[in-house]
Amino acid sequence: MKDKKLARHLIQDVVEPKARLIKKSVCSRSFITQLVKTGCLVLFYYFFSISLTFYNQRFIHSYKYPLSITMCHLIVKFVIAGIFRSLLQCYSHTPRATLNWTDYWKKIAPTGIASVLDIGFSNWSFEFVTVSLYTMCKSTAIIFILFFSILFKLEKFRCSLLFVVLFISGGLFMFTYHSTQFNLEGFFMVMLASFLSGVRWTLAQFILQKKELGLQNPVDMMYHIQPWMMLGLLPLSTIFEGLDISTTSRLFRYEDTSVLLTSIGLISLGAMLAFFLEFSEFLFLSHTSSLTLSISGIFKEICTLYLATQINGDKMNTVNVLGLLMCLCGITLHVILRAVSSKSTILAKICLVSACCHHLVSKLLHLHKICHCYTFSL
């Protein structure tokens, strides 16, 4: 009898209020608007990310100079960002944000170095690993992002958040299980890139969402960060690929002009894809968080792996399918938790404002009563 009462009490006082809150949060107009907005940003991000992944895989297997190719991409991105900044300044008739040297050194430099090492090692690993192994290893970035987000107090530690991260990571591991060709050198490169990705996106979120810096616009962020990325990659590309690329017949020692123009055209195409990918990432990050970007990236990686299996003719086993379902469940759970957390924050703010107003009104009434008594005594 006591157990039934306890169960009834638990359902009525704990489960039902939470269920009503979830229903109210998910079905609200503001949440649906935010969901549509985020969905458009996600599709924009997915298109360029998946396109660049397959492009880099094929191009790097052919050209074998991943660091030098990345350096060319950075130069082109910096030039395009500068052109876009000038156009925006002419259109708005207001000067664009420019950082002082202190902020540029302390805040942008670490993000730029971490970003270029993440991109550089990721591209380099394509020489050694398959898409499946790359995706499986890079999925651990979500754990590093969670760690650094909590460390920098961008996210509050919650058991539910940890559960979602582990759920998605485990699902992605199952999704890529037995579909990999292991390579130790490539594995270490991707894991290092995964760690740097956690640093990169956490610092980038801190910069983009700090209004004092004025870098909320992705173009301004890209313009300021590219020079540090070039400086960070230049020593590595010079040491490991400088001699080889200076003697290759496809670029500096070309014998046929058409070969040179083809190489320049392919590198420029990759640079354009990289520019719009980075633009979409920073745009997405400025409206959400590094953790949400990473979790959205999980579904993108699933799409990438699915396309890879279709192109390469690979088959998925039962474990892979179960892993895919785990990932999708984890992503859905994260969306619901975000909605409930956002709604709870709004309700807490409303309650706080209401309490402050009530306190202020009571004080004014008390002051009015004192003044009235003082006037009456006179």
Image (tube, rainbow, N blue to C red):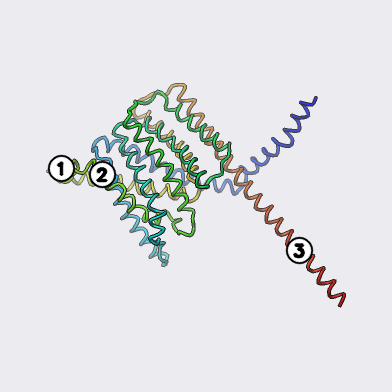
Residue 94 % position (x, y): 42, 66
First along the sequence among labels 3 and 2: 2
Residue 256 % position (x, y): 13, 43
Residue 167 or residue 24, whichever sits in front: 167
Identified by mark 1, the residue type is Thr
- Residue on which the image places disc 1: 247
Quadrant that contains the C terminus: bottom right
Q: Secondary structure at mark 2?
A: helix
- Residue on which the image places disc 3: 363
Mark 1 surroundings within 10 Å by alpha-carbon count, few (fewer than 14), some (14 through 19), many (20 or more): few
Exactly how many numbered labels are in the figure?
3
Mark 2 surroundings within 10 Å by alpha-carbon count, few (fewer than 14), some (14 through 19), many (20 or more): many
Q: From what the image shows, is residue 348 above or below residue 366?
A: above
User: Marks 1 and 3, Cα distance to the nearest angstrom?
Assistant: 82 Å
Q: Residue furthest right?
A: 377
Left or right of 315, for residue 292: right
First along the sequence among labels 2 and 1: 2
